[in-house]
Image: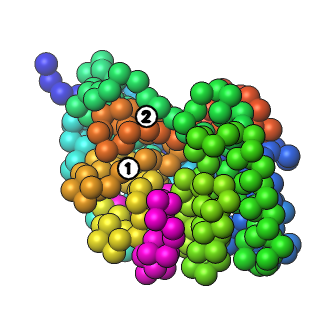
Amino acid sequence: MNTPTIRHVRAFTLRGAGADYHDQDAGHWIDDHIATPMAKYPQYRQSRQSFGLNVLGTLVVEIEASDGSVGFAVTTGGEIGCWIVEKHLARFLEGQKVTDIEKMWDQMYHATLFYGRRGIVLNTISGVDLALWDLLGVVRQEPVHALLGGPVRDELQFYMTTARPDFAREQGFLGGKMPLHHGPAEGDEGLKKNLAQLADMRARCGPDFWLMLDCWMSLDVEYATRLAHAAWEQSGLKWIEEALPPDDYWGYAELRRKVPPGLLVTTGEHEATRWGFRMLLEMGCCDILQPDVGWCGGITELLKISALADAHGKLVVPHGSSVYSYHFVITRHNSPFAEFLNMSPAADRIVPMFHPSCWTNRCRSTAA
């Protein structure tokens, strides 16, 4: 049987809480007074959408093979990502064998070095890569986890990212990760509110349930150190996540040295490629790596990141990305559990990413 080749690559944009899960209606917990790097400006403090966190929208990549098989994937990228896919990246895919994923990734990455390396370009390459793996699974009639070597365990365990860890505990999750609400610009009063919120959830969840804080790049080393010590002593915090801007490797290394023994430092959501994660590993920046498979370079690059982490004795627990992460996690020993990002507006129901209710208007790329 001849191996199918790629006939055509298409890209679309989507609005309304698809892969761009911040594109929510008003009143959603994920947009409500969460600490961000922009929170030092009062006018951008209450809503993350106020400074444009939802402007990109979802990028949908669809790849059609010569035998009629179609693979698709979603990531964050919107119209910008569509343009990159159709005007630049498609030339490295069309006509190639569906099995030549490594070569296609390498060509896409090196062809975009002059304007890429991370951010929106790597998001876009990630979306294409996920669609290529989906297409290969369709052609071979196997799930992607089988293509990655098969499961190493019979089931997945999850923690929930949510405003309601108490609900996560009721539902049987390992732990609950809350967004930090107040950053350094809100001073000691904001720090007290953060600690009070955590203490309230500890009282609701009991002593043995994991509680974590997602700081979304919003802190400095001094504030993060104070928060970590107080949260550990008062509420037994499990880990502090993405406390600093992603390029501050030196700050992460310092923070990890300063936090209480037993408290984990995690990061990597906004990092990309094996080279970025190599920096985190070699500089001793964290205890758990959290690449997002839709942003870090796709499954092809996540495999390399995971192998690098395994050689350093570190865990890889991918950020969000739902089913794309889950197919990967179940095949890796150094990924013992996964994240479930609860998309319920009030965090009081089980609503996963990519739930049908999240998708609204689908439109053709402006690059077409």
**CA–CA distance between discs 2 and 1?**
12 Å
* Scheme by which the image is coloured: rainbow
Look at 15% across and 24% down and name the residue there. Answer: 2
Q: Who is closer to the viewer here, 350 or 287? A: 287
Residue at screen point 60% across, 27% down: 172
Q: Is 182 on the left-hand or right-hand side of 57?
A: right
Give how far across and how far down residue 69 sits, in percent: 36, 23
**Amino acid bearing label 1:** Val
Q: Position of residue 310 (x, y in %)?
A: 25, 52
Q: Image point 79% across, 77% down: which residue?
A: 188
Give whichever of 257, 344 is nearer the camera.
257
Quarter of the image with the N terminus in it: top left
Name the residue: 75% across, 44% down: 203
Q: Quadrant of residue 80?
A: bottom right
Q: Position of residue 170 (x, y in %)?
A: 68, 28
For mark 2, give the secondary structure. Answer: helix
Q: Residues within 10 Å of mark 2 (few under 14, many from 20)?
A: many
> Is residue 214 one of those drawn in magenta?
no
> What residue does disc 2 label?
326
**Residue where numbered disc 1 is placed:** 316
Q: Is residue 199 above or below residue 225?
A: above
- SS type, badge 1: strand
Q: Is residue 232 visible?
A: yes
The segment highlighted magenta reads 249-273
Q: Is residue 84 visible?
A: no
